Image (cartoon, rainbow, N blue to C red):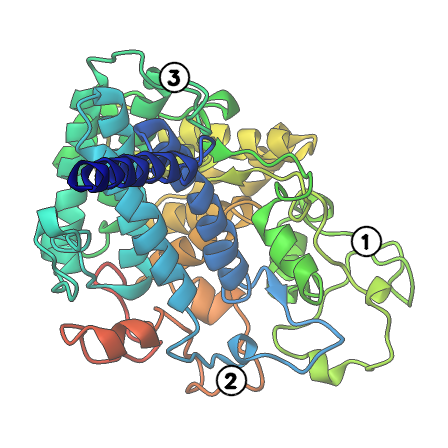
Amino acid sequence: MKSKINIYMFLSLALFFSCSDSLEEINVDPNTFPTADEAQVLSAAQGFLGYVVDTDLNFESFLWAQYYTWGIGVSIGNAERFVAEPDDHNGYWQRAYANCLTDLNYNSASDSPEYSGTAKILSAYIYQGLVDHFGDIPFTEATSGAIEDGSILTPSYDSAADVVYPALITMLDEAISDLSVPDGSIGDDDLIYAGDVDKWIKFANSLKLRILMRTSEVSPQGAAIQALIASGTFIESVDDMPMIPFSGASGDQNPMFARAEWGVGMFYFASNATLNQLTTLSDPRGEALYTLATTGTGAGNLVGIDQGTIDDEEFTNPDTNYSLASEYSYAETNDVILMSPWEVWFLRAEADARYSTSDDETTALENAITLNFDYMGVADAADYITSIDYASATTLDDKLDIIGVQKWISLNGTQEDEGWIEARRFDRPASRIFTEGIWQTPPLSVLNAGAFPASWLYPETERSLNPNAPAQRQITDALFWDN
């Protein structure tokens, strides 16, 4: 009897372990990896970045850049009254840190110099964006939540001017060093350049130039900029342009288009702040940026409204009485552009005007405008360049006014957020070309006369969950590089 019991016990144990092994195997999905590899992480981070740039940034900034104004169909929104709430940008903050930077932090530690280098470039790009909207941000402890990284769940804030911006230059230098010894590891998982290391280095140098130029009014970096222009390679053509493609198929639509169409659609109208400036300059790009009105007294023409005056329009007017976004500016197949060659050539024109680099400022400006005209499919760039008469600008401030206005126009339709940022920078004490010239004050603005938004509020989620978050600011508080 004893031996029979032992046999039964053995068989039971054998069956138990056999079933356990089988259950463990059954519960493993052969089509799902338990952890992501560097290639998957890179693709995921770039995909999220496309959403962040086009919806959290461009879509949120084109009103304050005064490319568009509120349209007919719904009650006028807070942004058009210069009202901001602390929860307006929870999504941007969360997606930038949790979805993009956390993934990129993983790849930054890769043994592959290509995965490490590209992760550092994209991280620098995202951190600069966070600084340029919020100022001081979590940086040195920002992605240290994992146990192996210190389990820091309430990161401290770093000075945008003294810590973050200088560290971004170092980060980009490290990225360029990494990519100088490529290992051929990146391919189609790289949605931006498909592993073209030379183009990634151009992107890194171009981003360095943007960061160094951003502080020109408050902390000139002339020597560093001169050295960079003399030795670096840059985004110079559309072929060099870092962008995230979208096919337009379901699930792969341009993020701005998908977000708007999921809601009430793209009901914003062309702002007269922009149309008036285009008219003043006899600039032919208006019809590439906006549609022509097809009904009403302005049929066949560009028809906008003054910023924030939609309540003065007849509520029964159809939107066809006005100019809306063209397919250049708003379409399901539009790529998300991270940095355009015209932006880079404008930076180089300004750099030579300010710091006498090895570039020629006039040629750089002409390259910027010509590339933008060509990308829009607009003819006669040469005639337009002659008409703006850059050669007649005899002072630095006169030159900066021309460069600043042309850059603001050229960023419309593709990099609206960067257009808002650069308009703030070019609006300087020596020449308030935007706040006292081009831009219009919405009649329902809650700000003092002549005041315009200069920054975003810290997200509500961050201030409620992180005891290290700074005191809340006003949206009129200028960031460290602003003036």
Q: Callout 2: few (<14), some (14-19), or many (20+) C-alpha neighbours within 10 Å?
A: some
Cα separation, mark 3 vs mark 1, equals: 40 Å
SS type, badge 2:
loop
40 and 356: which is toward the camera: 40
Q: Comparing marks 3 and 2, which lies closer to the viewer?
A: 3
Q: Earlier in the sequence, mark 3 or mark 2?
A: 3
Q: Earlier in the sequence, mark 3 or mark 1?
A: 3
The amino acid pointed to by label 1 is: Leu
Q: Is residue 170 above or below residue 178?
A: below
163 and 48: which is toward the camera: 48
Q: Earlier in the sequence, mark 2 or mark 1?
A: 1
5 and 114: which is toward the camera: 5
Q: Image quadrant for the C terminus? A: bottom left
Cα separation, mark 2 vs mark 1, equals: 28 Å
Q: Which residue is mark 2?
A: 445
Q: Are marks 3 and 1 in contact (CB under 8 Å)?
A: no
SS type, badge 3:
loop
* Residue 115: % across, % down: 27, 26
Q: Is residue 414 left or right of residue 25?
A: right
The amino acid pointed to by label 3 is: Asp
Q: Which residue is mark 1?
A: 292
Q: Which residue is mark 3?
A: 196
* Residue 22: % across, % down: 38, 34
Q: Image quadrant for the N terminus? A: top left
Q: Comparing marks 3 and 1, which lies closer to the viewer?
A: 3
SS type, badge 1:
loop
Q: Quadrant of residue 218?
A: bottom left
Residue in view at x 16 percent, y 30 percent: 173
